[in-house]
Amino acid sequence: MCTGLAYTNDTFYFGRNLDLEYSLNNKVVVTPRNFPFKLRKEEELSSHYSIIGMAMVVDNYPLYFDAVNEKGLGMGGLNFDGFAVYHDEQKGKKNITPFEFIPYLLGKCATVQEAKTLLKDINLINISFSEKLQLSPLHWLISDKDSSIVVESTSEGLQVYDNQFGVLTNNPSFPYHKYNMSNYLNLTANIPENRLSSKVDLAVYSRGMGAIGLPGDLSSPSRFVRAAYARLNSVADKTEQANVSQFFHILDFVAQPRGGAMAPEGIHEITQYSSCVSVEELTYYYKTYENSQICAVSMKNLPLDSTDLFVYELEKEQAIHYTN
């Protein structure tokens, strides 16, 4: 289970929580412009925008979970179990595997609008990376500074939805989440008024009572509501440090501590990592379950016309600053 987030406060930030019961040996990976992406059914993508994000690297191929390109387009894949359907090849379409989807779109598109145009020709096909790495059932949040969309490959084909909330969690499908938000239209960050009746005198006795009814569980629909509420009411100073800090606070609002949710295998699901990419600074910020300190990898000073991946191990040991 996961939560994706797009946030704009003068500049644009994109990231997510990745919630799983096991580690995937993730690394921060920068793919330079001339790294050759070999595609299973389409021509090699040999020249493209540079990309920074979290990925597994298998056989020198970055399998991205979430990433942002140098133009400021962000994309993340989230679990969509029971709903995702990948298809056979189709003539007249660009047949892209789900593990190629993030580099293909971020390599070619600078904006959400460009992505929408490209998506009209894409068919996500049922081809795994290898026998050991089967396809994950996913849907995707794609965002830039101006807008967000959700992409879902279902039995009806590729569906693209405008997403005014700027967040995404897991199944059910996005139309359900959008409809479900209407159940919470009375939520407010302000001091609530008595709407029950003018005949009774009811007093506000605590701050935050405008958010009574905000769900507190860890289910996908509830995390969608909580993340949307926090994002849409977010206030932060317009500095890089304040924005990054605020972004992680929003993700913390829907994070999973060990013991809160059990996977079918009897293992506890946790937020393995949280990420935040600053488009202006071209920097990937992250923290892990083991290390709550914010760490950062920048691609500003890297040779982005290179052909070789830049791979950075995660800092997982808890860093503590002692003041005495």
Image: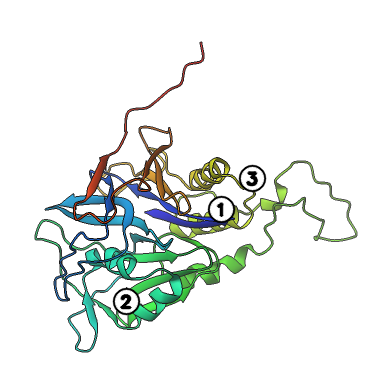
Q: Position of residue 137 (x, y in %)?
A: 27, 64
Question: Which of the two discs, 3 and 1, labels the residue nearer the N terminus?
Answer: 1
- Looking at the image, tell me whether mark 1 or mark 2 is earlier in sequence order: 2
Q: Nearer the viewer, residue 283 or 28?
A: 283
- The image position of residue 259, as x and y in percent, is 39, 38
Instruction: Tell which residue pokes out farthest to the left in this image.
Output: 131
Please, what secondary structure does the residue beneath circle 1 have? loop
Q: Which residue is mark 2?
A: 154
- Residue denoted by label 3: 237
Q: CA distance from mark 3 to mark 2?
A: 40 Å
Say what amino acid the circle numbered 1 marks: Pro
Image quarter where the N terminus lies is bottom left
| Element marked by disc 2 | strand
Does residue 59 appear left or right of residue 314 in this picture? left
Residue 215's disc number: 1
Three-letter code for the amino acid on which mark 2 is drawn = Thr
- Proximity of marks 3 and 1: CB atoms separated by less than 8 Å: no
Disc 3 or disc 1, which is closer to the eye? Answer: 3
**How many C-alpha atoms fall within 10 Å of the one at disc 3: few (<14), some, or many (≥20)?**
few
